[in-house]
């Protein structure tokens, strides 16, 4: 499995992969869910957050422990080459006392048997081979240990927005080909005034299409990123020179394509009710006590995922 597009995202410093608002982490019901889970752990309990990314859930574990006047030994593991203390702004301070383990698949965690009192994961377990990951999580949990996961739901607001953004990605990369038109216009400016006018008209028409799509969208983030990026690149083209401009457009296009790949991953990993029933059955086969998966909401009525609670008896 390629994770280079996720690694690029984490290097950008974002803490949460699917924030529910303008902040950098999780809020409201999602935040409360994790604070309650971690607050019930004993002093000096060991916690492992799988698929941790830039450590959003580890920070909630740390916060819950501090509020309860307890110490938790907190670890975060991810298949990607993560380094939250380095990549997240003020990360060295934020993640003080938290240990991160990069390049660690959930299917092969590499910790000793019974190492942890609790395992957590938000938008993580569904990206794994759960037939292998669940027995591995069972192995590293001590007897009486608990695990809690929030997973993408196929009908959640996040998946709905992701599907719309994928349509926008196709509009950018396949339909309007606006970045190709941007390159052609920059080259035409070195050719002739007539050529420049023609390519400018094509670029303007492509931009207008994206602006119209953004105006009618409930989730226009990707389109706004592209529109703003094109405008910024246009403003820098003479300062950068031909070669520098081409490099910057290439870099920007790689970022857009990586964003589309992350959206494709997200949609592809979203779980149906039938898939969650199978996952719960696999968890029981691995030795867990597992009630029926629940629905996770945010801000009252916004469905944002499934909730899967496991106990190692």
Image (cartoon, grey):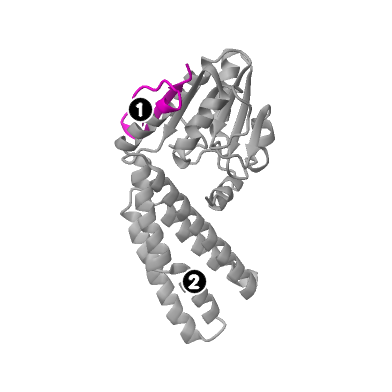
Residue at left 45%, top 36%? 131
Q: Is residue 301 magenta?
A: yes
Q: Who is closer to the viewer here, 214 or 172?
A: 172
Above/below status of 191 relative to 310: below
Could you give the CA–CA distance between mark 2 and mark 1, rounded to whole angstroms? 48 Å
Q: Residues within 10 Å of mark 2 (few under 14, many from 20)?
A: many
Position of 107 with respect to 30 (left or right) is right
Residue at left 38%, top 53%? 165
Q: Is residue 111 magenta?
A: no
Image location of residue 119, percent across then percent down: 53, 26
Image location of residue 227, percent across then percent down: 45, 60
Badge 1 marks a residue whose secondary structure is: loop
Q: Residues within 10 Å of mark 1 (few under 14, many from 20)?
A: some
Q: Which residue is mark 2?
A: 182
Q: Which residues are magenta?
A: 284-313
Name the quadrant containing residue 41.
Answer: top right
Number of numbered labels in the structure image: 2
Badge 2 marks a residue whose secondary structure is: helix
């Amino acid at each position: 499995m390629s994770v280079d597009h996720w690694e690029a995202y984490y290097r950008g410093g974002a803490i949460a992969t699917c924030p529910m608002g303008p902040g950098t982490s999780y809020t409201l019901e999602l935040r409360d869910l994790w604070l309650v889970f971690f607050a019930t752990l004993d002093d000096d309990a060991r916690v492992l957050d799988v698929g941790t990314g830039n450590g959003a859930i580890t920070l909630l574990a740390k916060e819950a422990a501090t509020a309860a006047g307890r110490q938790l030994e907190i670890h975060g593991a991810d298949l990607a080459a993560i380094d939250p203390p380095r990549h997240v702004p003020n990360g060295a301070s934020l993640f003080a006392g938290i240990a991160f383990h990069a390049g660690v698949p959930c299917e092969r965690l590499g910790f000793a048997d019974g190492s942890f009192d609790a395992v957590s994961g938000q938008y993580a377990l569904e990206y794994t081979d759960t037939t292998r990951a669940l027995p591995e999580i069972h192995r590293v949990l001590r007897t009486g240990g608990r695990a809690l996961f929030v997973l993408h739901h196929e009908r959640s607001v996040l998946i709905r927005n992701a599907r719309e953004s994928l349509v926008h990605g196709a509009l950018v990369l396949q339909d309007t080909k606006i970045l190709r038109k941007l390159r052609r216009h920059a080259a035409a400016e070195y050719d002739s005034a007539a050529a420049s006018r023609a390519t400018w008209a094509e670029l303007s028409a492509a931009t207008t299409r994206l602006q119209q799509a953004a105006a009618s969208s409930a989730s226009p983030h990707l389109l706004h990123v592209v529109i703003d990026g094109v405008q910024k690149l246009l403003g820098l083209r003479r300062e950068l020179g031909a070669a520098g401009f081409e490099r910057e457009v290439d870099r920007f296009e790689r970022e857009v394509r990586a964003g589309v790949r992350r959206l494709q991953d997200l949609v592809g990993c979203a779980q149906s009710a039938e898939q969650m029933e199978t996952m719960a059955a696999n968890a029981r086969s691995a030795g867990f006590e597992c009630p029926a998966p629940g629905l996770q909401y945010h801000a009252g009525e916004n469905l944002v995922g499934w909730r899967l609670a496991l106990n190692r008896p």
